[in-house]
Image (tube, coloured by chain):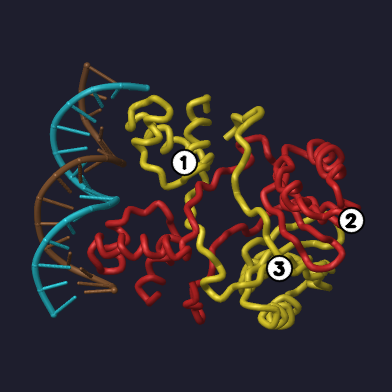
Chain colours: A red, B yellow, C cyan, D brown
Amino acid sequence: MDDIDLQILEILQEKARIPNAEVARQVGMAPSAVLERIRKLESQGIIAGYEVRLNPEHFGQKLAAFVLVEISCGDCRGTAEALAAVSGVQEVNQVAGNDGYLLKLRVADTEALGRILREEVAIIDGVARTRTLIVLATFKETRRVSLEGPVSEVF
Amino acid sequence: MDDIDLQILEILQEKARIPNAEVARQVGMAPSAVLERIRKLESQGIIAGYEVRLNPEHFGQKLAAFVLVEISCGDCRGTAEALAAVSGVQEVNQVAGNDGYLLKLRVADTEALGRILREEVAIIDGVARTRTLIVLATFKETRRVSLEGPVSEVF
DNA sequence: CGTGAAATCATACTGTG
DNA sequence: CACAGTATGATTTCACG
């Protein structure tokens, strides 16, 4: 991965749906060459995929929340998968410390959140306790990765 | 927004970089009509944008962490913006309760995280205390929104 | 919402350093 | 091996019905 690859990734992070030909212009190369580089980045897993970003508020999901799920591990295999299947869950992160998992979810409102915690989370095997953080406002939400600094060439 | 729009969004959530003509085939419409719908969804803000998903591990960012930032609000204007500017910060969520903000960040390693907390977060005006949750594993990480249920027509 | 023509783009192939 | 040039077919755009 060289400097031109980084330029391409930077452009794509800025605007993922830019035409290939436009990327080629910006990096000063032929479209075919740029395409070849992008394909290679995809096959190397450096580009993991492409996503549409929908506005959740238009789909009746006005509330975001983080839920810390404390685990009492009798039988914990499958807990993560069970949590991932809960309504509205966008993230399941296993975290160090007593709180075993940190979930991020998007739901309609506090009522729906309460229902989900009671009826879908609490019943999962190994779930001891939950602590919920209601999101009042989101000031930044990106998946951008800073492309500066040393780049691992592994994989 | 009607049922065909929902179908289109569902297809795009599944695979964002699908050619328009393919979407048209799946919903049984002319490509031009589909494109027109997509453009409308974009201008309405229902489609908020498109993203490349890069693999952070290829860019020396092997560690994810959540940081709860407790705020002692003397002068809190600008705190969120200051937090958003911290290295590696991907999310800044204001949360209810004592912990004022929940950050998500991606960094190289625990050493970098420590440095950032000391040198970039702790010095921000209004930051009283932080509690860090190290992510050991991520089982799910999506921005998909469930398109079922009642759809708000507002905006 | 569909059609069709024109512009633009994607991509496979080929040649070149 | 990476890149540019080229040709072909697909896609996007836009005016119009």
Q: Is residue D7 left or right of residue D11?
A: left
> Quadrant of residue B71 in the image?
bottom right
x, y percent for residue A63: 73, 44
x, y percent for residue A28: 26, 69
Q: Is residue A132 left or right of residue B114?
A: right
x, y percent for residue A38: 36, 62
Helix, strand or loop status at disc 3:
strand
Crowdedness of circle 3 by 10 Å Cα count: few (<14), some, many (20+)?
many
Q: Amino acid at mark 3?
A: Ala
Task: Say whether marks 2 and 1 touch (CB < 8 Å).
Answer: no
Question: Looking at the rendered structure, which numbered label has been put on residue B65?
Answer: 3
Crowdedness of circle 2 by 10 Å Cα count: few (<14), some, many (20+)?
few
Disc 1: which residue: B42
Residue under disc 3 on the same chain as residue under disc 2: no
Identify the residue at image location x=68%, y=64%.
Answer: B104
Helix, strand or loop status at disc 2:
loop
Q: Is residue B135 left or right of residue A52?
A: right
Identify the residue at image location x=85%, y=48%.
Answer: A125
